Image (cartoon, helix red, strand yellow):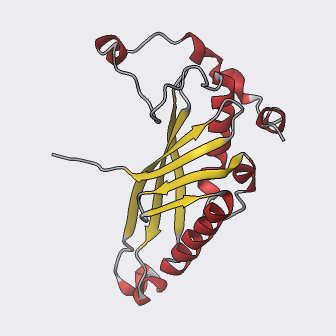
Amino acid sequence: MNLASRVSGFLTMTSRYSSLATLKPTVAAALAPNFQRSFSDQKPTSTAPSTSTLLKVDWLLQKITPLVLKSNVRDFMDICKDDVQFDDRIFSKKLGGRTQLMSHIAKVRMYYRYLSPFNKVEWIGSCVYENEDVIVVMWRLTTLDSSFMSYFPSFITKKENKMIVKEGALDVQIDREGHVLRIVNRPVLLFFK
């Protein structure tokens, strides 16, 4: 089933993105006119998906990201190609195919369910570049640092619960029809002075 026909009923909010097509180049783009962002080795401009296709996939990722550890991600799996490539740089896994990707998601869910009683995935934001084939989704995972004492209320133990926060970026490469070709899950490193 085509992505455009699947998601078109849900996308009344694309009108709020209609001003994206008329955006002026930023200062960074004006200072570096020769810089071209490319996810793959080949130039994606001839096979780049339309802006509306990029926004539809972005909308789906925005909806799915907070639910990845809790509910079904079948809507996302339906738009993945059968030979989708997945490079998880957080768990050091390289996978090929939709079934291996589903198995990896199930393993990550199980790992975090047994790691902590509280896990929350948040969608922070995403970057959609016109005339490109990549969507970058920023996410945050908050986990309760669990121990035997964390199951007791804090007013009894007089200790605050410690939260572990991980942030990452999901680089999703799509084709002209809106099917996912490649996914790279990478950590985001924060540098503070």
Give the residue furthest to the left: 193
Q: Is residue 146 left or right of residue 128?
A: left
Identify the residue shown where x is 43% and y is 90%. Answer: 148
State the residue in front, 34 or 53: 34
Q: Residue furthest front?
A: 42
Judging depth in this view, the residue of 157 and 170 nearest the camera is 170
Marker count (numbered): 0
Please, which residue is most extreme toward the bottom here?
A: 148
Residue 113: x %, y % from top left: 56, 76
Which of these two is toward me, 46 or 63?
A: 46
Position in image of residue 175 (x %, y %): 64, 34
Q: Position of residue 95 (x, y in %)?
A: 54, 60
Q: Quadrant of the C terminus?
A: top left
Closer-to-camera residue (109/104): 104
Residue 100: image quadrant is bottom right
Task: Tell me what residue is drawn at x 43 percent, y 12 percent.
Answer: 25
Task: Provide residue 78's location: percent of width, then percent of height.
Answer: 75, 50
Quarter of the figure with the N terminus: top right
174 shown above or below 15 = below
Residue in the image at 53% along x and 62% along y: 120
Residue shown at 53%/67% (left/top)?
119
- Is residue 75 shown above or below 35? below
Q: Is residue 62 left or right of residue 32?
A: right
Q: Quadrant of residue 34?
A: top left
- Quadrant of res 181: top right
As drawn, 170 above or below 45: below
